[in-house]
């Protein structure tokens, strides 16, 4: 399935602020570029001073002022850095928002976001989401009077049922991590907006290539940039993208005060990664679909979860709000004893905790990404001792399938029953 389409940026018959910014930076006359070109060139296609095509890494902690009351616009690196700023503008551009903020990690971005709320506020959260987000909210915010309801946000009726007058936000991952449930972004936004709350979408799994939640009504988008945006399993990063001027002021202040800003070299790595986002996402998806189909037919596999399957319960919704199903799948093995054998016998696919990089990774959520979630809640979300999560890389699809086949054959040998 194709990701962004040509002219996707020219929405509502006019240029978005991000588009105007891009056109201005590009010297004008370049709006209407295809998304493939936009990701390659970013917000500023070349350095206007030197002509450098690759954005320079401004490895400087501080910046000289010409005189008292005068500034180049840059003062101290925790608050602002030219390389990071270029990445923030590029993120805003590709996520189709007005503002972008870059943090040292995805958790750094989520930590900043949660500070927009106050003790006494209630937030509804997807029950199967990244375990680190659960840990942050539950261990560090619940004790201070923030309350959270963890529910299946793929079930719209449940969101309605859990809404209270003090509900200030919905925080959703869609597709969810790791069960691939899909939340209706547009309807959820409408619902929470009726009482002045905000919809926050963790868009890590699909990336801006396949889904733009702000255009569907979300107020804030968060990313672990460590994943598809950076794309090479070589750096951590996190982002917030949004459209609101007052929120921007608050978030900038939080970023500057807390100091979890992204370092210049890491910002440059993510900028470089974004250039191939389109190519990579299409290949990740192709490989994920091939692996999902193959696993679905395997006798040692009980069930495969992939929003690109026509029989996925929210297939129609996924088709409506996203331009692709992405590169992530999860599956239940029939026998829990197969888990260690499978993990030990994978060669090409690496047993590691992350996703979205060029290398295919296999994760065991129970012991890794979702370890922080209490057992009852984990099980109710579907994260059991037979669940595997697979992040399809960009290797050859036959090699990926051959690797899965060899490892599952070994499972059959070692666990005969
Ligand atoms: C969906 C999702 N959101 C947020 C995070 C946190 O990002 P980071 O590891 O960059 O802090 C992760 C990490 O795995 C994730 O999978």
Image: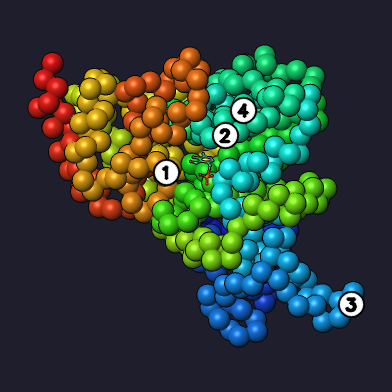
N-term-proximal mark, 3 vs 2? 3
Residue 68, numbered circle: 3
What secondary structure is marked by label 1? loop
In which quadrant of the rendered view does residue 20 lie? bottom right
Q: Is residue 102 above or below residue 146?
A: below
Of the pair 400 and 257, the residue shown nearer to us:
257
Label 4 or label 3, whichever comes before in sequence order: 3
Mark whose residue sits in front, 3 or 2: 3
Q: Looking at the image, do the residues carrying marks 1 and 4 touch, with CB atoms under 8 Å apart?
A: no
Query: Sequence-wise, which precedes: disc 3 or disc 1?
Result: 3
Residue at coordinates 35% horizontally, 32% vertically from top-left?
A: 364
Precedes in sequence: disc 2 or disc 4? 2
Structural distance between the alpha carbons of marks 1 and 4: 22 Å
At 58% across and 53% down in the image, what residue appears? 104
Picture disc at residue 139: 4
Residue that badge 2 annotates:
133
Residue 201: image location, x then y, percent: 61, 38
Q: Is residue 185 above or below residue 44?
A: above
Distance CA(mark 3)–CA(mark 2): 43 Å
Which numbered tag is attached to residue 354?
1
In primary-sequence order, the first of circles 1 and 2 is 2
Helix, strand or loop under label 4: helix
Left or right relative to 26: residue 179: left
Q: Please, what secondary structure does the residue beneath circle 2 have? A: helix
Disc 4: CA contacts within 10 A as few (<14), some (14-19) or many (>=20):
few
Q: Position of residue 358 (x, y in %)?
A: 36, 54
């Amino acid at each position: 399935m194709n990701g962004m389409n040509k002219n996707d940026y020219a929405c509502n018959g006019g240029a978005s602020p991000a588009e105007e910014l891009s056109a201005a930076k590009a010297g004008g006359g370049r709006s209407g570029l295809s998304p493939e070109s936009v990701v390659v060139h970013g917000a500023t296609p070349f350095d206007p001073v030197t002509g450098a095509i690759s954005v320079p890494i401004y490895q400087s902690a501080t910046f000289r002022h010409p005189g008292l009351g005068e500034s180049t616009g840059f003062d101290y690196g925790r608050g602002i850095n030219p390389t990071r700023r270029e990445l923030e503008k590029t993120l805003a551009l590709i996520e189709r928002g007005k503002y972008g903020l870059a943090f040292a990690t995805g958790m750094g971005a989520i930590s900043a976001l949660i500070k927009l709320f106050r003790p006494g506020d209630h937030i509804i959260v997807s029950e199967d989401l990244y375990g680190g987000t659960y840990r942050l909210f539950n261990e560090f915010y619940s004790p201070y009077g923030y309350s959270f309801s963890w529910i299946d946000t793929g079930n719209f009726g449940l969101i309605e049922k859990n809404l209270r007058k003090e509900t200030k936000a919905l925080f959703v991952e869609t597709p969810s991590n790791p069960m691939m449930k899909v939340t209706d972004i547009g309807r959820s936004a409408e619902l929470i907006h009726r009482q002045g709350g905000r919809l926050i979408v963790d868009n890590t799994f699909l990336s801006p290539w396949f889904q733009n939640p702000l255009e569907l009504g979300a107020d804030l988008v968060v990313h672990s940039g460590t994943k598809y945006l950076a794309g090479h399993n070589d750096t951590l990063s996190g982002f917030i993208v949004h459209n609101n001027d007052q929120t921007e002021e608050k978030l900038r202040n939080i970023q500057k005060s807390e100091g979890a800003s992204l370092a210049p070299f890491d910002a440059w790595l993510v900028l470089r990664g974004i250039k191939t986002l389109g190519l990579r996402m299409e290949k990740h998806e192709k490989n994920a679909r091939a692996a999902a189909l193959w696993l679905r037919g395997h006798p040692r596999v009980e069930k495969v979860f992939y929003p690109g399957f026509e029989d996925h319960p929210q297939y129609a919704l996924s088709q409506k709000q996203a331009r692709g199903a992405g590169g992530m799948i999860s599956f239940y093995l029939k026998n829990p004893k197969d888990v260690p054998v499978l993990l030990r016998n994978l060669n090409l696919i690496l047993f590691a905790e992350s996703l979205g990089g060029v290398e295919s990774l296999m994760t065991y959520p129970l012991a890794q990404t979702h370890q922080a979630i209490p057992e009852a809640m984990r099980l109710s979300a579907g994260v059991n001792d037979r669940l595997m999560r697979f992040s399809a890389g960009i290797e050859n699809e036959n090699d990926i399938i051959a690797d899965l086949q060899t490892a599952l054959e070994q499972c059959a040998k070692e666990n005969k029953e």
